[in-house]
Image: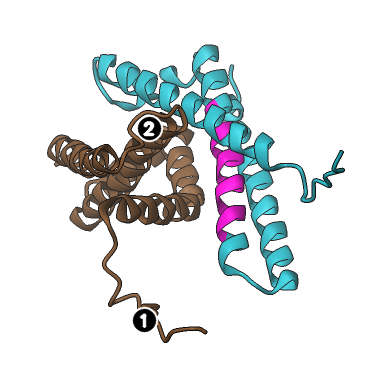
Amino acid sequence: MSKARPRYLDLFRIRLPVPAFVSILHRVTGAVLFLLIPVLLYLWQMSLQSPETFADFKAFMSRPLIKVLAIGLAWAYLHHFCAGIRHLALDLHYGTTLETARATSWVVLGTSGFLTLVFGALLW
Amino acid sequence: MVKREVVGAHYGLRDWLAQRVTAVVMGIYTLMLLAVLASLPKLDYWHWISLWEVPVVRYATLLFLLCVYFHAWIGIRNIFMDYIKDSGLRLVLYVITIGALVCYTAWSVQIMWGLDAAAGPKF
């Protein structure tokens, strides 16, 4: 009746196709962005409260480690943004064949990566 | 005639649509904010704070943040639905998430509309 079929539930043995990779990254970046909301609200408040706290904010943001983290956060936002646009296009039945779905997944990874580099260059 | 019973909580389509509408609003806001930031002559404190004193900026940002929080709720709820199998724990996580998002909403309003109070008494 039931054949002993291989079940690859080991995350390190699964090789995801590109669209699945983009999809899980969409979820992971969404979760990360959600968790960082209070940090971002705190920094935003700090930048607005007074000239002194604004200076503290600038000093904090100029630390190399914080800049690296900010670039990582920018990538998360940009990936979520680009993958989201791809998702909206799929909802409207654009790019639903296998080849185009794979191609647009690479476009999402490439575009968000490139924009992150631009952001990083501007920040540094 | 077959009488078909539709089961479920009936919020699927509504949330699916809400997730997309909020996404479009956030996308447009992001592009507009980038354009506004790029047009600032200088990013010092006075230019920065006067940007946030413009009513349109405040209300557009409030709309954006409400979209963020609602979008986050749908997304996080879906993540919990997928991975948290114990319904008691899932309910607790839902309550914590909603509580946090409601607090973030109040905090966001306070950040923007509390600016004058934070600056101290005006003479």
Report the span colored magenta. B64-79
Which chain hosts label 1? A
Which chain hosts label 2? A
The location of residue B116, given as percent across then percent down, is 58, 24
Mark sitting earlier along the chain (1/2): 1
Report which quarter residue A98 is drawn in.
top left
Q: Residue at x 22, y 46 (%)?
A: A62
* Residue type, label 1: Pro
Would residue B60 appear left or right of B89 to someone viewing this image? left
Which one is nearer the viewer's eye here, A7 or A64? A7
Would residue A3 appear left or right of A103 to someone viewing this image? right
The location of residue A117, given as percent across then percent down, is 15, 41
Q: Quadrant of the C terminus of chain B?
A: top right
Query: Would you say residue B67 sits in the magenta stretch?
Result: yes
Say whether mark 2 and mark 1 are on the same chain: yes
The location of residue A123, given as percent across then percent down, is 18, 39
Decide: is A117 above or below A93: below
Question: Distance between the Cα atoms at labels 1 and 2?
Answer: 35 Å
Find out whether the residues at labels 1 and 2 contact each other: C-beta distance under 8 Å.
no
Decide: is B103 above or below B89: above
Query: Would you say residue B97 sits in the magenta stretch?
Result: no
Disc 2, SS: helix
User: Any mark on residue A6, and which?
Assistant: 1
Which one is nearer the viewer's eye here, A79 or A87? A87
Colour chosen for chain A: brown
Decide: is B57 above or below A30: above
Would residue B96 appear left or right of A43 to someone viewing this image? right
User: Which residue is the site of mark 2?
Assistant: A85
Would residue B63 appear left or right of B26 to someone viewing this image? right
The location of residue B82, given as percent across then percent down, is 57, 63
* Residue type, label 2: Ile
Q: Main secondary structure of the magenta part?
A: helix
